[in-house]
Amino acid sequence: MKSILLIGLGRFGSHIARSLYGMKHEVMAVDISEERVNAALPFVTSAQIGDSTNKEFLESLGVRNFDACIVTIGDDFQNSLETASLLKELGAKKVIARASRGVQEKFLLRNGADEVVYPEKQLAAWTAIRCTSDSILDYIELDDGYSIFELAIPEEWYSKTIGQLDVRKKYGINILGVRDLGKLNMNVTADTLLDTESSVLVLGSLKAIQKCFKL
């Protein structure tokens, strides 16, 4: 369990708060809007109403005590930038900030943010990849070179084992797991058998996966 300071309770911030709450993490939520703070109370550990660009207010939260500070202010980039900078100045261990454009990402990384999330860009890439084939069930980009895909298995894979397919040698793809009837098995071996209801979790480059699965 980790302690998280979450600043900004718009739609994106609220979704993050709910997800963290579901994973049993301790979350202190902060927003300048009393209405947003009250709406978040059922799924955060504690909440404060305040201006995160005010150094004294931010310092009073004890930012050094949190494992990570997440800035999800989406409607005022100047406030987001100032908040990230102040958090780092006050000794925050890790600052993760939201960007909505590429230039914002650059400014945030130069002014206090250790990592930047880009939800619009990431969602656009996810949607574009998902739309290219009905076989693609899910997709996570790790970096420019590698991604994890969940794909329905091709017909020619039916009733074959992972060892028989040998996709690692042929395509440079690693099969990480197999999902059968909704249950994911990550303990796969060369003898793991695939059937018509299976989907596979694979790691590899987009080109290799496209070639292997004929996408």
Image (cartoon, rainbow, N blue to C red):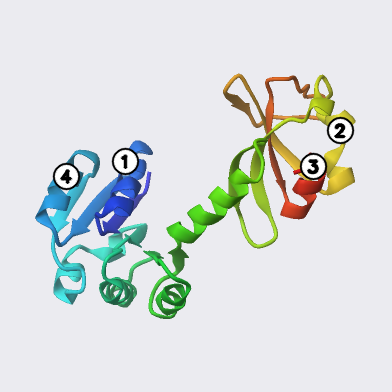
Classify residue 184 as left or right of residue 114.
Answer: right
Q: Which residue is mark 3?
A: 214
Q: What kind of element bears circle 4?
A: helix
Q: Which mark is residue 21?
A: 1
Estimate the spatial distance between the alpha carbons at disc 4 and disc 2, rounded to whole Å. Answer: 51 Å
16 sits left or right of 157 in the view: left
Residue at x 59% of width, y 44% of height: 130
Residue at left offset 65%, top offset 43% = 149
- Amino acid type shown at disc 4: Ala
Q: Is residue 165 above or below residue 209?
A: above
Question: Circle 2 sits on which residue?
Answer: 165
Residue 16 is situated, as x and y percent measured from the top left of the image, at 35, 48
| Viewer-proximal residue among 94 and 71 | 71
Between 157 and 41, the residue placed more toward the observer is 157
SS class, disc 3: loop
Circle on res. 39? 4
CA gap, disc 4 to disc 1?
A: 14 Å
Residue type at mark 3: give it: Lys
Q: Are marks 4 and 2 in contact (CB under 8 Å)?
A: no
Contact (Cβ within 8 Å) of mark 4 with mark 1: no
Mark 4 vs mark 1: which is more N-terminal? 1
